[in-house]
Image (cartoon, rainbow, N blue to C red):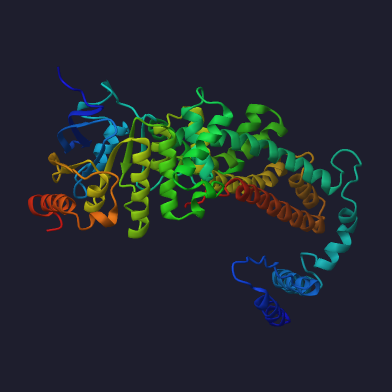
């Protein structure tokens, strides 16, 4: 509101002192503290208010629908009441699988981290091979195209048979789920490296290793990260299903266990947590991508 | 005894095979370039000018004949034949400085110390007047500036032959004139041997010692080679009315538009 006033004031002050051949360093205008806070608050409000309103509306509808006698699902108020202990104390550990949600989450995240890390390494390596070599592409691409359509859980019995243990089997399922989009996107990225960059590398006589790190990886980074982002989403989708079947500590089995004990409220709470963590994982990979690929965007 | 030119293209043929179809692009190209000479190759688009440059650069293999540099055959790319590409080809994730430094580090890894390599990078950026933008990324500078950096990168390799592939083709007329002046100044200072592809008649006459005119493809040949007997340093404005300049220009225009006018455009 007071911006125009400030402006005309600086102009009025600056004019008489502007002697010829003298450079004036004009200090950047400072908006008053209150105004700055106000604009910040406005930005926050425009971003935060709509989701809060939508959430409130949805919760109200849910509450109204499920409050009736004989509703099969609990309303949000009842969910909150029944799971309050789990929400306030996620760290309890009474042995076995009777642990707080933090421990379940962390067990699931560890499996995802391991399986996903392996998938990222193997995926980028295989994708590079397929992208670089026409023969590797001709040989491997049909295999990849068929295998990637196999649903994650269909791999579980096979991996249980191979590993004879739940833990490595779950990790393998994550691995095999996440690897396909990583391979395919990396290969596309490598294949799309402009001929110009290859020419530059050839004129400079970059060797294979230099070419890989100085040209290939940065040039294909946007594609690789697209694959990594799809991969992390799929891993998180697969872990819940896999854990339901293998049992033990983990958010997937927590949900299955809650269903077997008819604790519907606990299932709902777990679903909310799964959604939030999945969202955070996606944001993390997206954040790393923006940092790493800064400047690689087309010129 | 026979004199062997610094860079010699000896009876070069080039054809591309696609499936069973074979297209002959260049036929029997023989050309000698002396050390320190500035030679332009001009011709209509599609006549194989860029192919010829890529053959000299070693980016494409010749089908027959050979390219000799200092009497040694070259058949793979190398920093002794640095290329300034038409579309600058700077790596967009590296800064201006890092783009040039990449070349310097690679070419002088064993012969210059760390400090010397830094100084050499800065020296070449200075040469093209781009030292002020050394920390910018290619996306943040103009087309003309990118081309300057591309030139600095090529010069920094201390090439025996500098290959310019329509280096100013994508620039506006004013920027192009600025860069042409820069190239002339650098050529005068360093005495590089330059092979330049162009489709701009004025550019060819202004910059070159000799102009190689190509016939239309397929199977393009060297149609005519024109000496440009203009004294250096050349001044753009003074030359605009110069009789020799106009005569050279006329010759090239006649070649391009009367004797070998662009068939597809007709």
Residue B36 lies in quadrant? top left
Residue at the extreme left: B259
Tell me if B249 is positioned left or right of B50 in this view: left
* Residue B165 position in % (x across, y down): 31, 43
Determine the image quadrant of residue A174: top right
Furthest-front residue in view? Answer: A20
Total marks shown come to 0
**In front of the other: A30 or B39:** B39
In this view, the residue in front, B70 or A46, is: B70
Q: Residue B266: which quarter of the image?
A: bottom left
Q: Report whether B28 appears left or right of B231.
A: left
Residue A147 visible in the shown view: no
Q: Is residue B1 above or below residue A62?
A: above
Camera-side residue: A115 or B216?
Answer: B216
Is B71 situated above or below A51?
Answer: above
B238 lies above or below A198: below
Q: Quadrant of the N terminus of chain B?
A: top left
Q: Is residue A218 left or right of residue A203?
A: right
Residue B252 appears left or right of A51: left
Is residue B176 in view?
Answer: yes
Residue B110 location in percent, x, y?
51, 22
Q: Position of residue B147 (x, y in %)?
A: 40, 48
Vertical comparison of B265 with A44: above or below: above
Give how far across and how far down residue A47 sits, in percent: 70, 69
């Amino acid at each position: 509101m007071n911006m125009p006033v400030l402006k005309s004031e600086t102009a009025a002050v600056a004019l008489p002192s502007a002697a010829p051949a003298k450079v004036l360093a004009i200090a950047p205008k400072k908006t008053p503290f209150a105004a700055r806070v106000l604009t910040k608050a406005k930005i926050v409000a425009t971003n935060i208010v709509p989701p809060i309103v939508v959430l409130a509306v949805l919760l109200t509808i849910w509450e109204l629908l499920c409050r009736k006698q004989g509703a099969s699902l609990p309303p949000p108020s009842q969910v909150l009441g029944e799971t309050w202990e789990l929400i306030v104390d996620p760290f309890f550990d009474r042995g076995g699988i009777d642990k707080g949600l933090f421990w379940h989450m962390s067990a699931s995240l560890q499996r995802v981290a391991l399986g996903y890390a392996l998938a990222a390494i193997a995926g980028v390596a295989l994708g590079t091979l397929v992208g670089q070599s026409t023969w590797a592409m001709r040989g491997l691409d049909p295999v990849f195209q068929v295998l990637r359509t196999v649903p994650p859980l269909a791999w579980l019995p096979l991996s249980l048979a191979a590993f004879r243990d739940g833990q490595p089997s779950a990790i393998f399922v994550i691995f095999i789920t996440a690897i396909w989009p990583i391979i395919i996107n990396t290969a596309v990225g490598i294949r799309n490296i402009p001929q110009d960059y290859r020419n530059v590398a050839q004129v400079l006589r970059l060797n294979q290793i230099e070419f890989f790190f100085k040209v290939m990886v940065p040039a294909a980074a946007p594609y690789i990260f697209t694959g990594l982002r799809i991969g992390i989403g799929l891993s998180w989708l697969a872990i819940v299903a896999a854990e339901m079947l293998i049992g033990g500590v983990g958010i997937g089995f927590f949900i299955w266990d809650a269903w077997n004990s008819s604790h519907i409220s606990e299932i709902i709470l777990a679903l909310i947590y799964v959604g939030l963590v999945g969202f955070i994982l996606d944001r993390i990979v997206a954040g790393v991508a923006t940092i790493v690929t800064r400047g690689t965007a087309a010129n | 005894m026979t004199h062997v030119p610094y860079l010699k293209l000896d009876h070069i043929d080039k054809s591309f095979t696609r499936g069973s179809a074979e297209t002959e692009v260049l036929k029997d190209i023989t050309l000698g370039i002396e050390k320190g000479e500035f030679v332009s190759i001009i011709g209509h688009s599609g006549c194989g000018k860029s192919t010829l440059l890529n053959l000299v650069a070693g980016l494409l293999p010749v089908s027959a004949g050979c390219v000799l540099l200092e009497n040694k055959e070259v058949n793979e790319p190398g920093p002794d034949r640095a290329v300034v590409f038409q579309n600058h080809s700077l790596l967009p994730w590296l800064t201006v400085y890092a783009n040039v430094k990449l070349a310097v580090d690679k070419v002088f890894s064993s012969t210059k110390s760390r400090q010397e390599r830094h100084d050499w990078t800065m020296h070449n950026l200075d040469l093209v007047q781009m030292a002020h933008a050394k920390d910018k990324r290619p996306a943040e500078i103009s087309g003309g500036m990118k081309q300057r950096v591309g030139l600095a990168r090529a010069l920094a390799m201390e090439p025996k032959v500098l290959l310019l592939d329509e280096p100013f083709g994508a620039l506006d007329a004013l920027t192009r004139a600025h860069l042409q002046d820069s190239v002339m100044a650098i050529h005068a200072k360093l005495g590089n041997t330059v092979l330049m592809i162009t489709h701009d008649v004025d550019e060819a006459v202004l910059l070159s010692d000799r102009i190689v005119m190509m016939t239309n493809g397929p199977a393009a040949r060297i149609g005519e080679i024109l000496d440009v007997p203009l004294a250096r340093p050349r001044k753009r404005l003074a030359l605009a009315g110069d009789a020799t300049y106009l005569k050279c220009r006329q010759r090239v225009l006649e070649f391009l538009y009367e004797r070998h006018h662009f068939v597809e455009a007709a």
